[in-house]
Amino acid sequence: MDLFDDLPEPTQSSGPVPSATAAPPQATTEEEEEEEEEEEEEERRLKRRREESHDNKEEEEEVKRVCREGLPVLRGYVAARRGEREEMQDAHVLLPDMSGHLSSLPGRASRVSYFAVFDGHGGARASRFAAEHLHHVLAKKFPSGETGNMDTLIKRCLLDTFRQTDEDFLKTASSQKPAWKDGSTATCVLVVDDMVYVANLGDSRAVLCRMEASAGADGRRRLLTVPLSTEHNPTIYEERRRIQRAGGTVRDGRVLGVLEVSRSIGDGQYKRCGVISSPDTKRCQLTANDRFILLACDGLFKVFSAEEAVKFVLDVLQEGPVEQRAGLTEEELRSEAACQQLASEAVRRGCADNVTVILLSIGF
């Protein structure tokens, strides 16, 4: 029985007669009913999608919240000394939270941090340019969304970032009258959740202080100084060979007897001699045994070995009570004091160069 059989048959009225092509009332009613059902089904589908999207967002936020709770807490402290130089040619950057510079975080990462030291030579323009621009270039090239192998992508991103920053500075330098001849080392620490990525050019360094349980019965913890960077100077065999293949020479441990480093940002006049801007990259996962990372220019390491610098900081961190200051915990006060005292001690030991030290405390 048809659904509309109970409806009265249409009667002839004095109104206008329907045209021969008009659809009968029953057909129009069926079409409207089908359209209504389709609209209702579409609304149900949209509602399900909204609910699923909301559930997925809540799940993603919960994953990030749990991840954040287990992540190391990084705090950065910096100390800079001009030494006996007429000009401060070092520059530095501390970005404990870099998310504001990124369009989105990669995958399920919940935090990205960035710290860097730049040691200029021939002037301060290259180091300042790198400090102002490198992290912005990094942010533009940084992987986002659901990505593949994060380590591979970040390494490629760092290589491209250093190359782009060098090209941008050289373009700016060559447009000046007279052309700038500044150069700069660069050591950058990028922390994605609990993974540390280090990219460096030249002779600034990054080292990690790690305390591991000793194999002995006394249960004492053993101090490890873990190098996180690679030094680049013309006396190293691979560096010297590259310079010589490019037509350059190494005299008195310097490129053409002048430039003390074999990789740098800037130094346009030495690029044809094999001086490159490709950084070495290292990766290290932070653990509950890690205390801090030291990031410093060569001014520090001219008078301190890496092991001595780490032990110096550790001794200050373990000293007695410190004078309290509003808004700072005792641990923060100790870390700040350790950073400042290390830079001052480098000058006291006779370092005439600029000294810049960044101390990254690590807490779980």
Image (cartoon, grey):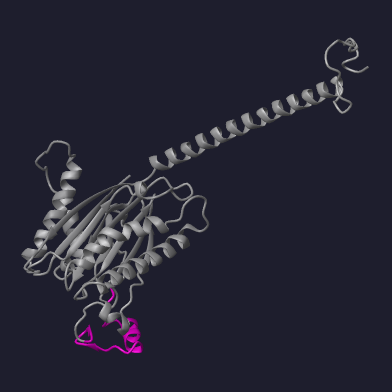
**Residue 352 higher or lower than 233, as above or below:** above
* Residue occupying image coordinates x 31% and y 57%: 216
Viewer can see residue 306: no
Nearer the observer, 346 or 354: 354
Estimate the x, y position of residue 291 in percent, counting from the top left: 27, 52
Viewer can see residue 259: yes
Q: Is residue 335 left or right of residue 17?
A: left
| Span colored in magenta | 231-256
Q: Is residue 244 left or right of residue 336?
A: right
**Residue 29 higher or lower than 185, as above or below:** above
Q: Quadrant of the N terminus?
A: top right
Residue 239 falls within the magenta-colored stretch: yes
**Residue 188 higher or lower than 31, as above or below:** below
Residue 81 falls within the magenta-colored stretch: no
Estimate the x, y position of residue 231 in percent, counting from the top left: 28, 73
Q: Give residue 307's quadrant in the image.
A: bottom left
* Residue occupying image coordinates x 33% and y 56%: 136
Estimate the x, y position of residue 27 in percent, counting from the top left: 85, 24
